[in-house]
Image (cartoon, rainbow, N blue to C red):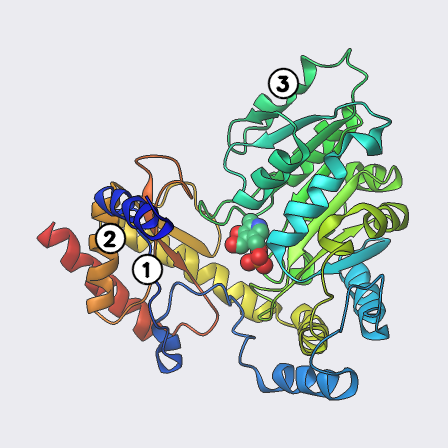
Amino acid sequence: MNLSQASQQRLELLAQDSLKRVLLPCPLNQRAFDFSSNDYLCLAQRGDIVEAGHECAKKYGAGATGSRLLSGNLDCFEQLESQVAQFKNAEAALVFSSGYQANASGLAALLDKSLWSGVDPLVFTDRLNHASLHHACQLAGVKQIRFRHNDMAHLAELLAKHTESTQPKIIVSETVFGMEGDLLPVEQLAEIALQHKAVVYLDEAHATGVWGPQGRGLGAITDPAIDALKAMGHWVIMGTFSKAVGVSGAYIACSETFKQYLVNRCTGFVYSTAPSPFVIGAVSKALEIIPNLNKERCALHTAAETLRSRVHEQGFDTGLSNTHIVPLVVGSNTACLELKAHLQQAGIRTSAVRPPTVPPNAARVRLALNTGHQQAVYEQLLHALTHWKVSA
Ligand SMILES: Cc1ncc(COP(=O)(O)O)c(C=O)c1O
């Protein structure tokens, strides 16, 4: 069998289970009806952000020309990292070209036993963590000790089983779960981590810009346990510039020493060309703007609450959602594709999220709300949903 035949066979198997993905065009003029985008604050097309990207590219070039350790360490990176550290209330920050890269290589570097004098760390992970976090565990060759989703009592119980162990302990979670749309009880997690002197690695991809004080993420809240963990260098926060920040790329906010360790040992940093200066200029501008968008964030949270209660009235299940991400959990892959197609017919774009992104029988249409959605669009969405329930 040649590669084309093997690929075709695999695609047919995926199609049989309604799991085959296809690339569809995303027309720019339909953004107002788009519930599939992660541009939660509608910054991706903001003129001053695009302009700042251009300005930075004009000054530094379209590309960084190399890894930061070779030819690419332009001063715009250092400036952005100081800005990110301040934004996250952290000692230092390191930027990456994508969130996947930051997690896959940054977390893998944290889990690398050579960092811990050759001792394997014990790694406690939320069951619903993003694929990039799983990938990091695989890369580092660690066996995950998984706790039930957002269940802090279960996490505490699992840690308690290892109190005698001298192995380093590392807890990994998202702060806003991208597919569930629920929030990590961050203070509780910090308290538990502190009791066990564990290192905390949090992924703020969906929180950055939208949650926490002035949109700085949940990792930026003021809390005595978090302060104590920070003092030990045990508070490592990753986040992306690709969602509410409206651009692309990612950061890890941490202690200065851990940053310097990553500069030396994180493969996704060492062996990858630094991000484009356009990205750096645009991100820097977006981070200047984000703290001033409290009114927009409030409106977004209110819209999500209203939408949830209205879809509940129609009999839809929104799972654990309590954020701007509202899944309509329908269960089967076929029902999920049908609902997505039905909404598409009504002019509303959504994402059909199926396994392995979510657990089996938990397929869902994911509604990602943004600050640009108008009341009329919500009405259009709700009207279409009523129709689907009737015809199903
Ligand atoms: C929780 C989480 N982490 C990391 C990523 C990867 O980020 P990026 O799209 O910037 O590679 C995503 C993207 O979907 C995500 O949802």
Q: Is residue 73 in sight in this rendering? A: yes
Residue 10 position (above or below residue 123): below
Task: Confirm if mark 2 falls within 8 A of ligand 1.
Answer: no
Q: State the quadrant of the N terminus.
A: top left
Which marked residue is nearer to the observer: mark 3 or mark 2? 2
**Mark 2 surroundings within 10 Å by alpha-carbon count, few (fewer than 14), some (14 through 19), many (20 or more):** many
- Helix, strand or loop at disc 1? loop
Residue 380 position (above or below residue 228): below
Asked if the residue under mark 1 is in contact with the one under mark 3, i.e. CB atoms within 8 Å, the reply is no
Residue designated by label 3:
158
| Most foreground residue, 294 or 29 | 29
Of the image marks 3 and 1, the number of the one nearer the N terminus = 1
- Helix, strand or loop at disc 3? helix
* Label number found at residue 337: 2
- 364 displayed left or right of 208: left
- Residue 113 place in picture, x, y as percent: 78, 29
* Label number found at residue 22: 1
Residue 348, by quadrant, is bottom left
Of the image marks 2 and 1, the number of the one nearer the N terminus = 1
Q: Residue at x 55, y 75 (%)?
A: 44
Of the image marks 3 and 2, the number of the one nearer the N terminus = 3
Q: Residue at x 60, y 71 (%)?
A: 247
Q: Residue at x 49, y 66 (%)?
A: 299
Q: Give, as a three-letter code, the residue at label 2.
A: Leu
Alpha-carbon span between mark 3 and mark 2: 38 Å
- Residue 2 place in picture, x, y as percent: 35, 48
